[in-house]
Image: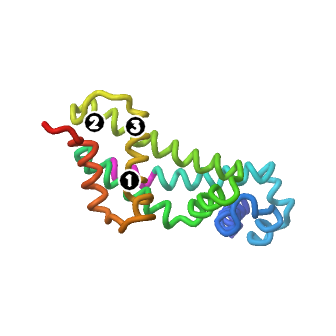
Amino acid sequence: MSVDRRALIVEAANKSFALFGYKGTTMDQVAKIANVGKGTIYTFFTNKEELFQEVLNQLLSEMKYATNQVLSKKLAFFDALSEALNILLEFRKEHELALKLTQEVREIGTPMAVEATQQIERLIIEHIAGKVEQAIERKEIKPCDPELTAFIILRLYMALAVEWSKNHQSLDKSEVARQLRFYLENGLALK
């Protein structure tokens, strides 16, 4: 049975980037983890950036698949939204590469790590925007700019699920969902 060297290299790169971040990963480390010569890596990838993008593309595909599983269900807009956002937050918390990239952006600000986190955010916003468009068509929500609305939804969700807990007691998933509904579905205005 032949070994898929490219897949082996990508898996090794994923491990290295998750452990050491973009800045701390070298092609020598990847070669050592993959148990291949450094030259073998260059038969598949031109440079570290290209290899990193391949690893990131796999992460983005996994995220897309996970959210599509939820968003394909026939749920009301706010129910599907809460469930998909919970999955994405759990994904970010549990996926070592996403954690390391977030840490590297905070501590060092490595341009490739910044770009990677921006790609992740763009993917999430595109997914939410698609659901916003569908909700508008089904007359579940008022007409609005889907991309701007998706951005606001993501920021509000992150504020409730992550930022709030830095200085307050953490909100559980059901409370985050309830608060999202309160601000987005009901609003503050007295009716």
Q: From this viewpoint, is residue 7 visible? A: no
Q: Is residue 67 magenta?
A: yes
Q: Is residue 169 left or right of residue 117?
A: left
Q: Where is mark 2, residue-wise?
A: 135
Q: Where is mark 1, residue-wise?
A: 85
Q: Where is mark 3, residue-wise?
A: 129
Of callouts 1 and 3, the N-terminal one: 1
The residue shown at (36%, 53%) is: 84
Mark count: 3
Of callouts 3 and 2, the N-terminal one: 3
Q: Helix, strand, or loop for circle 1?
A: helix
Instruction: Residue 20: give x, y in percent of width and height.
Output: 70, 67
Q: Residues within 10 Å of mark 2 (few under 14, many from 20)?
A: some
- Residue 180 vs 36, above or below: the answer is above
* Figure quadrant of residue 2: bottom right
Q: Helix, strand, or loop for circle 3?
A: helix
The magenta-colored residue range is: 65-71
Spatial separation of the CA atoms under disc 3 and disc 2: 10 Å
Q: Is residue 41 magenta?
A: no
For badge 1, the amino acid type reads Leu
Q: Is residue 47 left or right of residue 69?
A: right
For badge 3, the amino acid type reads Ala
The residue shown at (36%, 68%) is: 169
Q: Helix, strand, or loop for circle 2?
A: helix
